[in-house]
Image (cartoon, rainbow, N blue to C red):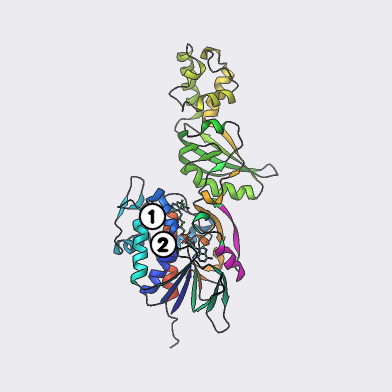
Amino acid sequence: MNVIIIGGGASGMAAAITAARAGAAVTIFEKEDRLGRKILATGNGKCNMSNSRWDGEEYNETARAFAAKVLEKVSPGETLEFFEELGIYPREDGEGRIYPSSEQAASVLDALRFEVQRLKIEVIHEEWIKGVIPQRDGGYSVVSHVNTRRKAEKVIIACGGDAGRQYGCEGDGFALAEMVGHTVTEPVPALVGLTSKEPYFKQLKGVRAKGEVTLTAQAQSGEEEVLGTSRGEIQFGETGLSGICVFDLSGRANRAMKEEKRCTMRLDLFPDVEQAAFLEMMRRRLTLSAYKSCENFLNGLIHKKLIPVVLKQCGIDKINDKAEKITEEQMDKIAYMLKNWDVRISGSRPWNDAQTTSGGVALSEIDENTMESKLHPGLYFAGEVVDVDGRCGGYNLQWAWSSGILAGRSAAAQPKTEE
Ligand SMILES: Cc1cc2nc3c(=O)[nH]c(=O)nc-3n(C[C@H](O)[C@H](O)[C@H](O)COP(=O)(O)OP(=O)(O)OC[C@H]3O[C@@H](n4cnc5c(N)ncnc54)[C@H](O)[C@@H]3O)c2cc1C
């Protein structure tokens, strides 16, 4: 069996190794001058390669059943065995996130590269594939940007999405899939910071606060829907919000904005306290702090840089005035805002800052038992090019490994002969 793999990233290498081990002659076409550059950047250079915690909500809602089936075929446990065979000893942090014990993404990449070499997989660098042409007599011809043509019985499209464009992924896989008639759900950046035009962000650069964020979208008809809630560290930057809890909702925000919906992120800085109890606590606090300045009244409750912003939003400009001047109405506003701080979202950080892509090749056109195209036998998809995106925590790489191994295994399999 002759297999061409387009893209030598996480899913492409997993597919190549699996197919070669099953006896296929494998060629990888990789656009960049080396394999797997993006892997080096994952998990802040430590490669959060998987996760031990699964609650069924790791992937985009429309992909959950599909992803579950693929992960049943190639489980996270099997993936870790695949890596242990390559010498990668996994270690889990306190939150279920799995990293190589070396805590170096480079060791994951090296292990994959060495196995690619050991299996004598052909790697053609710096040639990017611009066309996959189904042949009349079966199989495919792939065409590179310098018009090299190569034929293969099976082709796996594993060239990622649009996220992290600086690592070679510029949506080529979507174009290749569309060229052969596949439907592609419009890609939008996911696991990315969201921007806001609220005037206070410039002064909040570097602030981090624990809390809960709730994303709402309002259609032009006025109808409002809650798109999701997430807890964790909210990071305030010069241009808007980031942090894992924001990243996890960013794909949904970007998709809603594409549909011309108005998105708002509501921040609750005290999610464990009910609104009424919080208000009471704040009133008591004011009674005890009446002699302090307005600024000092909030000292120790929220980050120092947040104080003038919150006070201003609640109508208090003179932060050095005595706290006793705060009116009951202003007090109620402060207590409300700290649990319901609405940030109007204006957009997203660019593709280069995104960790994954929401959207991709439609799942209804792919067989979840094999990752084979339902439109073109012998054509397979793996990784981010498919309409599956996970939340932060190692779930995207897990998807890349599992779908890559499944595609490689299926592509290398010889067709059953009729009795
Ligand atoms: C900064 C950053 C940090 C991340 N951290 C994590 C993390 O810790 N944990 C996690 O689970 N996920 C993480 N991700 C997401 C994860 O890296 C991706 O989900 C995963 O790499 C996708 O695998 P893939 O094989 O589909 O695509 P990629 O790994 O992106 O590989 C695609 C490859 O195809 C090549 N290519 C593209 N077009 C062509 C073409 N036309 N011809 C030939 N080759 C082509 C590209 O050069 C690239 O090498 C992170 C992403 C980024 C950007």
Q: Residues within 10 Å of mark 1 (few under 14, many from 20)?
A: many
Q: Is residue 170 magenta?
A: no
Looking at the rendered image, the quarter that the N terminus falls into is bottom left
Q: Position of residue 352 (x, y in %)?
A: 53, 51
Question: Is any atom of residue 403 visible in this view?
Answer: no
Query: Which of the two discs, 1 and 2, labels the residue nearer the N terminus?
Result: 1
The quadrant in which residue 174 appears is bottom right
Question: Closest to the observer: 229 or 142?
Answer: 142
Residue visible at 47% across and 31% down in the picture: 270
Q: What residue span does the magenta drawing correspond to? A: 172-188
Question: Is any atom of residue 104 visible in this view?
Answer: yes
Q: SS class of the residue under badge 2?
A: helix
Examine the rendered structure and indicate whether residue 373 appears above or below residue 271: below
Q: Amino acid at mark 2?
A: Trp
Q: Position of residue 149 (x, y in %)?
A: 54, 77
Residue visible at 37% across and 68% down in the picture: 116
Residue visible at 60% across and 50% down in the picture: 255
Looking at the rendered image, the quarter that the C terminus falls into is bottom left
Examine the rendered structure and indicate whether residue 194 appears above or below residue 176: above
**CB of mark 1 within 8 Å of CB of mark 2?**
yes
Q: Residues within 10 Å of mark 2 (few under 14, many from 20)?
A: many
Marks 1 and 2, Cα distance to the nearest angstrom? 9 Å
Q: Which residue is mark 1?
A: 50
Q: Which residue is mark 2?
A: 401
Q: Amino acid at mark 1?
A: Ser
Question: Closest to the observer: 4 or 368?
Answer: 4
Q: Position of residue 344 (x, y in %)?
A: 61, 37
Q: Mark 1 near ligand 1 (CB under 8 Å)? A: yes
